[in-house]
Image (cartoon, grey):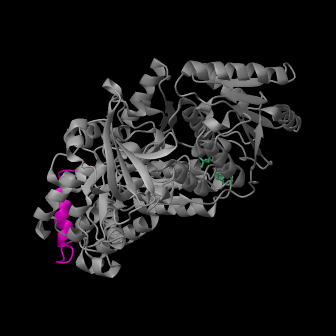
Amino acid sequence: MLRKELNIFTFRDLLEHFPLRHLDKTQVSLINEIDPTSDFVQIAGRITDVTVMGEKRGKRLVARIKDKSGTLELTWFQGITWVQKSLFPGQDYLVFGRCGFFNGRPQITHPEMELLSSVNKTGQAFLEPIYPSTEKLKARALNGRQIGKLTAVLMPQLAERDIPENIPATLLEQLKLPGRFQAYQNIHFPKSAQAYENALRRLKFEELLIAQVRLALVKLNRHRYSRGVVFEKVGDIFNHFYNNVLPFQLTGAQKRVFKEIRQDTARGKQMNRLLQGDVGSGKTIVALLCMLLAADNGFQSCLMAPTEILSQQHFQGLSSLLKDMPVNIRILTGSTKTAERRKVLAGLADGSIQMVVGTHAVIEDAVQFANLGLVVIDEQHRFGVAQRARLWQKATIPPHVLVMTATPIPRTLAMTAYGDLDYSVMDELPPGRQPITTVHRNEMQRGGVMDFIRSEIEKGRQAYIIYPLIEESEKLSYEDLMQGYEQVKSWFPEPKYRISMVHGRQPPEQKETNMQRFVTGDTHIMVSTTVIEVGVNVPNASVMVIESTEKFGLSQLHQLRGRVGRGSEKSFCILLTGERVSNDARERIKIMCATNDGFKIAEKDLELRGPGDIEGTRQSGMLNFKLANIVNDKAILESAKFYAQHLLDNDPELSSADNLPLKNYLLVKEGKTAWSKIS
Ligand code: ADP
Ligand code: MG
């Protein structure tokens, strides 16, 4: 039962089944102090009478207890006969339980009862642990307190060697943390609130330190032992592009990141790097520079995007930049026609194609590369870990991998979920961008919003109108979109206005044509679902209207908003909602209106949603901490990261006497935990 419900198999699991909280049983309340806000209460008083009431299913045992301030009802629905036998009217009891109100009167259902005469009267502080349980277990009388009784039996039988220390002694001392054995005792059965706090802090730190040491070891070992292809020189291809083709100056951040990548790829070790940049910070050009570097060194490269549209767009962008250069670049997606596909496959296999842009069609088994040296994964959260792993098998020496995020990831999340990757940040937008103005409008103000779009179109600009994907039903999303489209058409009648529409049900060619018409400026308005979400680049578009904004998450909204503000014109984002908006949605909208900074938004998003909900991290298993929480325990995480790095800097093998306990712990646990690279 414990096994099935709570995953508790062994004593150790029981020991690591930590209490949710503790109850302070030293407090005894007076009955007239109890009010509807009271939760668990403890009272002392005399039982005045015990009666069985009701019949059959309504049958219950009711006892009344009286203290100097009033009386209270105690009720049992189960075990009536047994309880009745063990309760003695006229005796004084200590009663403990969760208080509820019934017909305006306080009552406790299924309280715990102890004869006052048998209660330890020394007045010693007593914090009782309450454990997570499940309804099923509760039904079998194994509630959160009973579990504590099991633990209480187990605990005294343990000695220090059963819970060996795993943090170096000097570190414990430095951080004033209790030892491991003591921490386990105090997290379950603390002698004081302070002892509990210390134990909790220690165990959280332990969890995070272990995780950080592991991640740092993966990284360290890659830096030391992995083999990687060497991009030793910057050659003609790169130089020609940089000096004669690149249409703008790189930003400082772009230069810095390229330099980091350049160093990484020249060392003969495999690069596995995460590039974080805000929407519009110019990640694509960095990717292209890296691909040119690969070509200069005789290696093929591939750029993978999560959708067909994005692949098309990347391909068009890159191939037009490369049109006068001796670089053979092709596209490979699910909709590539058979004949063309055959040609691309052949060209990749014989090395005559240097660059390929595509969706996951690129990682299908049939695709063989002559000498793949670099893989760039754009907007990576859409690629599963397994998909990425397949790329390794495309070359004898694993290619360098550059993973680019769609929007920034909160720092704490990056540290945990992607902590084994090297890490670059582009925190600078290209010059000349004007901040996007974001406003919230409701349904009543729709007319004004449409007028505004009209005035922007008159100035020669274009607009997006985005509808949410309704997760439960593709059909609903579609109907929503169609209805929206009809409405937009009535505001913006043909032939004066032209509208593109793109959605998931269209065949790829149609999507492509409609997209293309908007890109070239032939249509004024793009009506679409979130297929447009990532990456699309139409600098002339200056208005983004988001319908049913309340249905979108923060980072998605930010990503969508990033579709405007890409040119030199002032841009606007209008968040439309119904008249009534939930508090959560209101909070998101407030943040969107207040800032354009993706790094700030990412932090807020994590705070609002919690770590479990952030896309792409759930399967990584890196966030399944028992006690620590990367949102609330930021400071502990920072310190764990710092000390993990510090330990390994000074003793990469963890072989000093001080570090051995940690090393042993990692070795023992290694077999148990699935411990694989993220990318
Ligand atoms: P993202 O980082 O969101 O993928 P993109 O790579 O799509 O951003 O770049 C956004 C726009 O900025 C593109 O039109 C690109 O050509 C332009 N851009 C990129 N770098 C610079 C730069 N250094 N100076 C001016 N414009 C730039
Ligand atoms: Mg992009």
Given residues 347 and 41, the one toward you in this image is 41
Given residues 229 and 346, the one toward you in this image is 229
Q: Position of residue 131 (x, y in %)?
A: 30, 52
Q: Quadrant of residue 211?
A: bottom left
> In the rendered image, which quarter contains the N terminus?
top left
Q: Position of residue 309 (x, y in %)?
A: 58, 31
Residue at the location (16% across, 61% down)?
155
Residue at the location (68% across, 53% down)?
596
Does 451 sit left or right of 338 as displayed? Answer: right
Q: Quadrant of residue 509?
A: top right
Where is 83 relative to 174, above or below? Answer: above
Q: Position of residue 296 (x, y in %)?
A: 47, 51
Residue at the location (61% across, 51% down)?
282
Count all numbered tags in the image, as a single digit.
0
Q: Is residue 654 magenta?
A: yes
Q: Position of residue 356 (x, y in %)?
A: 48, 37
Instruction: State the extent of the magenta-drawn residues as a range.
Output: 653-676
Where is 88 relative to 199, above or below? Answer: above
